[in-house]
Amino acid sequence: MSICRFLKWVVLLLVMFPSLFDPSLSHFDSAKKKQMREKVRKMFYHAYENYMTHAFPHDELKPLTRSFTDSLSELGNLKLEHLPQNYNGTALTLIESLSSLVILGNYTEFERAVLWLSENLSFDVDARVNLFEGNIRVLGGLVSAHILATDSKNRLVQGSYKNQLLDLAEDLGQRFLPAFDTPTGLPYAWINLKYGVMKNETTETSTSGCGSLILEMGALSRLTGDPKYESASLRALRKLWSMRSSLNLLGTTLDVETGEWIEHSSGIGAGVDSFYEYLFKAHILFGKEDFWRMFHSAYLAVQKYFRHGPWYHEADMRTGKATYWQLTSLQAFWPGLQVLVGDIEAANSSHREFVHVWKKFGVLPERYLLDHQMLHPTEKYYPLRPELAESTFYLYQATEDPWYIEVGEAIVDSLNLYTKVEGGFASIRDVTTMQTEDHQHSFFLAETCKYLYLLFDDSFLVDRNYIFTTEGHPLPVLSAWHERLPEIYIPSNWTYVKKEKPKRASAMSLQVCPALSLNSRHGEQLVESACHIPDARNDHKCFSDEECGVDSTNCRRRSCSLGGYCGLWLII
Ligand code: DMJ
C-alpha cells in the first residue's frame, strides 16, 4: 500500500471511529459499553412492553401468567396476602418507568405516559398503602417526572402539560399527612389513601419508614411553595435522630405513639438502609448543615460498630455488640453511598464481596448467614433488586475502572439467563434452584435497568447535577433549594468527580476525617478523599502505604501489607 493510500485509510478510520484514537477510551471499551447499553435497553423494553400489554393500568406485572397484581396496597409485604377487592391499581409500574424512559431517551413514550397519567390517575382509592413505599415509588416518581417534564433544557412534554403530575403529587402528599398526626410526629407505617389512618392500625414502623421521606416531601414543598410536607418529614427525622443511643446507633423498628424502640438491633440493611442514604442526600439537595452533622455521626458509628473488614453485621444500638452476622442483598447499596461520601476504598472492598456472593449464586440471595457461611433457610429469594447494579454504577463513575463494566456485564448476563421469561422478568424464589416467581417488581424498571443503563451510558448526566432518590428517581441539585451552598459542596455531587483527576475524590471526605486535610501541590488544593485509595488497577492491590489513604473509622493512615492489601494492621 502506498503511503498516500495508507494515510487516506487512517483519516477515514479517524472520521468513522474517533474513539479508536482516543487514548482515554479504547475502542474495545467503548464498543463493549455500547453493546451492553443496547442489551440493557432491550431488557427495559421487554419488561416495559409486557407490563403495558398485560398489566397496565394495574400496578405490577405477573410475568409468568401474563397478568397483573394491584400490589401498591401491599408493597413492603413481599407475600401480597391481603390485596383489597375494590382497588384496581394506580399504574405504579408506569409511574416508576417515567424517569427511566427519559434516561433511555424515549421522550415520545414519556410524553404519552405523562399525558395518560395526567388525565386518568386518581389517588381517591380505598387502598391501604405503606407510607415509605408510596413515598419513594409514587410520590418520588411523580415529582421527578414533573421536574423532567418542565425542565427548561428538556421541554419533554409540549403544550398540553399543565403541571398535572405536580397536582397529583400534591394530592398524594396531602393524603400522606394524616399519618404524621401522632404524639411523637413519627408517622404511621400504613395509610389508607381514601380514609386516612385506619382504626386499630399498627403503631409499629421502621427507621427507614420515618427517616426516608425528606427528599420527596422536601422537593414537593419546594415545588409547591407549601412547607407542610417538608416540615412533617423533618419533624419525624429529628424525632428519630433524638432517639439514637449514646453510641449514635439506631434500632430497626419502633412505636410511633410512644417513641420507644421495639427492635434494638440494626445494621445497614432492611428497615434502616435509606435512613442513612437520605441524611446524606438531603444534605446534598438542601444544603442544611444539620443533615451533614447527623450523617457524619451516624456514618462513623456504622463504620465503628457494624463493619467487620468488608462486611457489615448488625449490632445492638445500646451496647454496640454484634447481634446478627448476615449479609443481605439490600446492604449492597452501601458502597454506592460510600462513593458519594468519598470513601472509595471502603466502597470498593465491600462491593467486591457482594460481587463474590453474586457470582457464587448467580444472583444475590436476600440473606446469607456470614457466621455459618450458608443461605438463610427462608430468605433464599432474589426479587430483581437493583442495589448491586447501583453500587457498580457509582464505583465506575468514581474510578472509571473497567472492572466495574465487567461486573455490570455479569449482572446483565445473569438477569437474562435466570430471570427473563417470555412475559417479562420474573423474581427468583430460591437461588439454589433458580425457580422463578410470578412477580416483576416496579423497581426493576425504576432502578435495576436504569443503573445498568447508566453504567454503560451516562450521557443523561453530562452537564447535569442530579442525585437519585432511593428508588432511582433523579432530582436536580438546585442552588435555589439550598439553605447554604458553599463552593466546596458543589463538587460533592459525584457527577463532578469524573471530570476531575481521580485523586480529587469528594469534598465530603474532607469532613469525614477533617484532621487530615489537604496537601497543596503546585498551589492547587487537592480535595483528596480521606479514605481514598486509587482504584485504577485491575487487581485492586496497593504497592505503597501512600496509596492506602486513611481509615474512615478512626482517621488513621492505612498501610499496604506485603500481600498488597490496605489495612491498619501494620500500624496498630
Ligand atoms: C427499592 O424499593 C428501594 O431501593 C428501597 O430503598 C429498598 N430497596 C428496594 C429495591 O430493592
Image (cartoon, grey):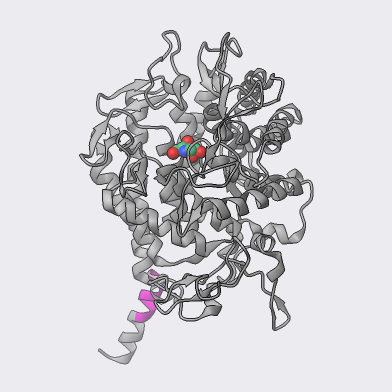
Give the percent coordinates (x, y) of residue 445. 42, 38
Can residue 507 be seen here?
yes
Q: Is residue 457 left or right of residue 235?
A: left
Q: Quadrant of residue 29?
A: bottom left
Give the percent coordinates (x, y) of residue 375. 30, 43
Q: Is residue 211 above or below residue 545?
A: above
Residue drawn 74% across the image and 43% down it: 481
In the picture, the quarter occupied by the C terminus is bottom right
Residue drawn 49% across the image and 30% down it: 95
Q: Quadrant of residue 436?
A: top left
Give the percent coordinates (x, y) of residue 60. 39, 26
Residue span colored magenta: 10-16
In the foreground, 357 or 113: 357
In the foreground, 536 or 87: 536
Residue drawn 38% across the image and 53% down it: 354
Is 14 within the magenta? yes
Residue at the extreme left: 433
Task: Determine the main secondary structure of the stretch shown in magenta.
Answer: helix
Q: Is residue 420 left or right of residue 545?
A: left
Q: Is residue 537 above or below residue 88?
A: below
